[in-house]
Image (cartoon, helix red, strand yellow):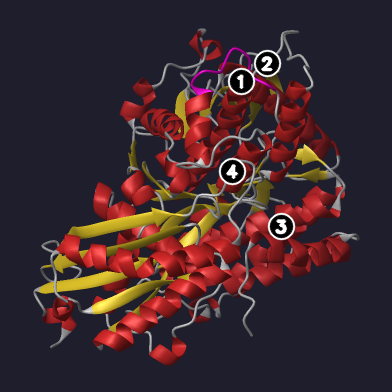
């Protein structure tokens, strides 16, 4: 049956580009691309590989984790969605960007499901997955998108069939900066280092410690800030004093780091909004769950007469449902990934994807 | 032609003007635009017929007050310093009339004309649009000798800027004005004479908004400057993306140290854009 005229379309999505393994099942109804089309999340399950405090997740161990949990997670996703294998139209998986070994594990698993069940495969760009899910959940139709996570920091706007990158980090991702700073302070990685920094920062704020502020046009840079924050952490442990001559705490450091890097992110987003003339802003990616970032972005957007759209951890943090959703959007326009081309790659730019499902 | 259209009336009342604009003046100030950096008002300086631009950086509500004060003061002072330097060295930029960094404002020469972005879009808009569903291509811009000439003038302005030891920090086609040439002035190297449509691309390229500018002689900073413009150009005018090479060519002709900057630009591209390693 022709997928573009089918009334109910169901996709299963598999995501594993970093330390989260996610599998989700999505349902699209109505004519694709029309105003009557709807998206329903049937299931969205996830399992996270958490490494001990002071360490990061290594590709080898993460891939091992994904392989170990894939089958039970896929079963749970199907059971929660209440769909039979026969109901599924396509299997979607993350082609990239991400860590090589975990991506490979999940791509192999997705390929196996496709062959086992006789379904077609759809390879999805991870960043586009985030953007499309954010749009679907929040209803933001033409926003400037800030995509912030452990591996990516990009300011994106849609134009002429592509998600175009207006600004991005020139070195490490903002989430990577936060994760590695958490390691310097031995902050727990459970449930996520960024979450624990956010909670700790709420207790800080007596002083604002001086950190570099690195914005270049619509781009920014975080590696220098990380170095300085690590130096300050060492200074603090050695009993050093803050700018007011009093000792400062880990909470003050977390507070100062958040205030500085989030101000940079809001600034480059504001610049992109002014540049494209948009008042909507959508935050996606794991760091997008941070409520302080959402609050700051909201203040900026309100000042410009607009509003901020953000989602919670179910959709911000890597998940399978966004891969299913973006994959199904592409599938509905006729996009397929033949099994012999079902590869994955660590480097896959957001603007490489032809966005045929948008005007 | 008047500069960017004045902001709608509701925007005029939406923001309280900075204190300096509440004093009695011959001409009432009008809010021109709310950029990312702050607001731009049109008012007059000393004489009622001497128009000027007042740039005001209001406190950012989202930013920590200490960080905000530090950034506002540092950026405004740096901007004035850089503009003064460019002015002395003959780079086309607005002149600084007056400023108060702590209060967050600066008065500058009013530049007539339209932003380069608007001019390019108007030019491209007059061309045939790409076919339905087709990949946007540079084909449509191929017959654009006047556009190539504008690119050349942008490259010359960039070369002059970098020669002065200044990097702009936020180069986009919105941050360049096309100032109409006054009567009697030589129309240097401006081709496209007879074509009426090409008139939109005529004029002198004047660089504006030095809010993120710094004084730097390093190849790295200069290369990032070019890279920021290159990407802004590609995302704002995807149909004319290919013409950007012309900017770099004339930059190279204008600026003696350009070759090493362009080598660095390759590095910056590889680093900034996680380019596909395939093939």
Residue A32, x across and y down, in percent: 18, 71
User: What residue is shown with label 3?
Assistant: B226
Q: Chain of mark 1?
A: A
**In whole angstroms, how far apart are the C-alphas of marks 2 and 1?**
6 Å
Q: Chain of mark 3?
A: B
Residue at 72% in and 8% down: A246
**Would you say the magenta stretch is mainly helix, strand or loop?**
loop
**Viewer-nearest of discs 3 and 1:** 1
User: What residue is shown with label 2?
Assistant: A248
Task: Tell me the element at label 2.
Answer: loop
Position of residue A334 in the picture relative to residue A265 (left or right): left
B192 w.r.t. B40: above or below: below
Which of the image's four quarters has the N terminus of chain A? Answer: bottom left
**In whole angstroms, how far apart are the C-alphas of marks 3 and 4?**
31 Å
Which of the image's four quarters has the C terminus of chain A? Answer: bottom left
- Per the rendered image, the range of residues in magenta is A201-209
User: What residue is shown with label 4?
Assistant: A179
């Amino acid at each position: 049956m022709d997928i573009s005229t089918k009334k109910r379309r169901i996709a299963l999505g598999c995501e594993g580009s970093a330390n989260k393994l996610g599998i989700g099942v999505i349902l699209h109804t109505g004519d694709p691309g029309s105003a009557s089309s709807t998206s329903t999340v049937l299931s969205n399950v996830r399992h996270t590989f958490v490494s001990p405090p002071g360490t990061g997740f290594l590709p080898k161990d993460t891939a091992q984790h994904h392989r170990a949990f894939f089958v039970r997670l896929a079963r749970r996703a199907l059971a929660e969605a209440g769909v039979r294998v026969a109901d599924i139209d396509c299997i979607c998986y993350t082609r990239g960007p991400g860590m090589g070994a975990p991506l490979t594990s999940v791509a192999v698993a997705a390929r196996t499901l496709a062959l086992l069940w006789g379904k077609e495969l759809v390879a999805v760009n991870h960043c586009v997955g985030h953007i499309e899910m954010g749009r679907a959940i929040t209803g933001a139709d033409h926003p400037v998108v800030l995509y912030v996570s452990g591996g990516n920091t990009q300011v994106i706007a849609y134009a002429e069939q592509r998600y175009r990158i207006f600004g991005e980090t020139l070195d490490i991702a903002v989430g990577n900066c936060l994760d590695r700073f958490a390691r310097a302070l031995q902050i727990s990685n459970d449930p996520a280092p960024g979450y624990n920094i956010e909670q700790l920062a709420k207790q800080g704020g007596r002083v604002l410690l001086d950190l570099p502020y690195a914005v270049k046009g619509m781009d920014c840079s975080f590696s220098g800030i990380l170095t300085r924050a690590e130096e300050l952490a060492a200074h603090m442990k050695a009993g050093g004093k803050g700018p007011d001559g009093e000792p400062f705490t880990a909470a003050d450091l977390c507070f100062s780091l958040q205030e500085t890097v989030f101000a940079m992110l809001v600034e480059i987003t504001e610049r992109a909004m002014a540049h494209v003339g948009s008042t909507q802003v959508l935050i996606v990616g794991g760091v997008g769950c941070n409520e302080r970032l959402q609050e700051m972005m909201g203040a900026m957007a309100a000042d410009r007469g607009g509003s901020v759209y953000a989602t919670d951890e179910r959709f911000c943090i890597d998940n399978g449902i966004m891969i299913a959703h973006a994959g199904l959007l592409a599938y509905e326009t006729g996009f397929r990934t033949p099994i012999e081309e079902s590869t994955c790659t660590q480097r896959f730019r957001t603007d490489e994807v032809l966005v045929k499902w948008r005007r | 032609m008047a500069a960017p259209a004045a902001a709608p009336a509701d925007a005029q009342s939406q923001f309280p003007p900075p204190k300096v604009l509440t004093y009695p003046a011959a001409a009432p100030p009008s809010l021109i635009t709310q950029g990312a950096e702050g607001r731009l008002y049109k008012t007059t300086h000393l004489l009622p017929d001497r128009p000027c631009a007042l740039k005001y950086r209001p406190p950012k509500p989202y930013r920590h007050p200490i960080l905000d004060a530090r950034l506002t003061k540092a950026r405004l002072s740096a901007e004035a310093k850089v503009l003064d330097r460019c002015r002395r060295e003959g780079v086309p930029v607005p002149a600084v009339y007056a400023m108060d960094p702590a209060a967050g404002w600066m008065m500058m020469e009013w530049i007539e004309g339209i932003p380069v972005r608007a001019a390019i879009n108007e030019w491209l808009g007059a061309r045939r649009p790409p076919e339905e569903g087709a990949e946007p291509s540079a084909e449509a811009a191929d017959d654009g000798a006047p556009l190539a000439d504008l690119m050349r003038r942008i490259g010359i302005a960039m070369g002059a800027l970098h020669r002065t030891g200044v990097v702009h920090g936020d180069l986009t086609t919105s941050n360049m004005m096309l100032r109409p040439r006054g009567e009697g002035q030589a129309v240097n190297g401006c081709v496209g004479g007879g074509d009426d449509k090409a008139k939109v691309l005529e004029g002198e390229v004047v660089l504006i908004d030095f809010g993120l500018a710094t004084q730097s002689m390093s190849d790295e900073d200069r290369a990032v400057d070019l890279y920021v413009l290159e990407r802004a150009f590609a995302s704002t005018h995807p149909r004319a993306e290919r013409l950007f090479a012309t900017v770099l060519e004339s930059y190279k002709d204008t600026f003696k140290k350009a070759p090493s900057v362009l080598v660095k630009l390759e590095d910056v591209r590889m680093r900034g854009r996680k380019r596909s390693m395939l093939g």
